[in-house]
Image (cartoon, rainbow, N blue to C red):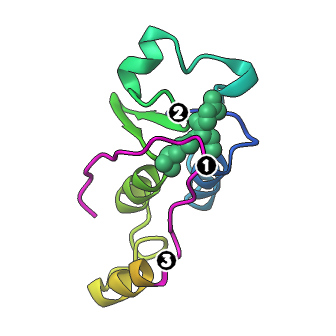
């Protein structure tokens, strides 16, 4: 089952939860970040070296950076819905910024490469 780490009052975590719900994916979420801690635990830092939320684990694959997670889930589960079959429509969606990143002010960013 898809595992999500992150507190629900984080917009970046909400984005991933929205995506999982839209795709009808069963998932298990664990509070992490701010008052919940967790993000500075060595095992968490091994998954997400930025020490931020969200992070997900899916069948052994760890993915972090909310937009990367959304693109990964859409690519895996969203054919014809969140991932349009037509490459032109996909390009238009990217151009529109529909999945544009929301960066929290404290966020240090560097991403992972997941083919779209
Ligand atoms: N670019 C990152 C930003 C992640 C980020 O800044 N997350 C914030 C919450 S919105 C965070 O982890 N803050 C520290 C904390 O909650 O402990 C992403 O999109 O995932």
In the image, residue 33 lies at what x, y percent?
65, 27
Q: CA distance from mark 1 to mark 2?
A: 10 Å
Q: Mark 2 to mark 3: distance in Å? A: 23 Å
Residue 104 in picture, x, y percent from top left: 61, 49
Left or right: 46 with respect to 70? left
Mark 2 vs ligand 1: CB below 8 Å: yes
Horizontal side of 51 relative to 84 (left or right) equals right
| Label disc, if present, on residue 104 of the rendered structure | 1
Q: Which mark is residue 52?
A: 2
- For marks 1 and 2, the one nearer the N-term is 2
Residue in view at x 36 percent, y 80 percent: 90
In the image, the residue with mark 3 has its CB under 8 Å from the nearest atom of ligand 1: no
The residue located at (42%, 76%) in the rendering is 80
**Magenta part of the chain:** 96-116
| Rendered image quadrant of residue 77 | bottom left
Q: Is residue 45 visible?
A: yes
Mark 1 vs ligand 1: CB below 8 Å = yes
Does residue 26 appear left or right of residue 71 in this picture?
A: right
Residue 10 position within the rendered picture, expressed as x and y whole percent measured from the top left: 69, 44
Q: Residues within 10 Å of mark 3 (few under 14, many from 20)?
A: few
Quadrant that contains the C terminus? bottom left
Viewer-nearest of labels 3 and 1? 1
């Amino acid at each position: 089952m898809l595992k999500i780490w992150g507190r629900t009052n984080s917009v970046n975590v909400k984005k991933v939860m929205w995506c999982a719900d839209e795709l009808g994916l069963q998932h298990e979420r664990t509070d992490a970040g701010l008052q919940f801690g967790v993000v500075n635990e060595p095992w968490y830092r091994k998954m997400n070296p930025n020490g931020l939320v969200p992070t997900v684990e899916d069948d052994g694959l760890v993915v972090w950076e909310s937009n990367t997670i959304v693109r990964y889930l859409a690519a895996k589960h969203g054919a014809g819905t969140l991932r349009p079959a037509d490459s032109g429509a996909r390009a238009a969606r990217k151009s529109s910024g529909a999945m544009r990143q929301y960066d929290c002010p404290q966020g240090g960013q560097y991403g992972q490469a997941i083919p779209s």
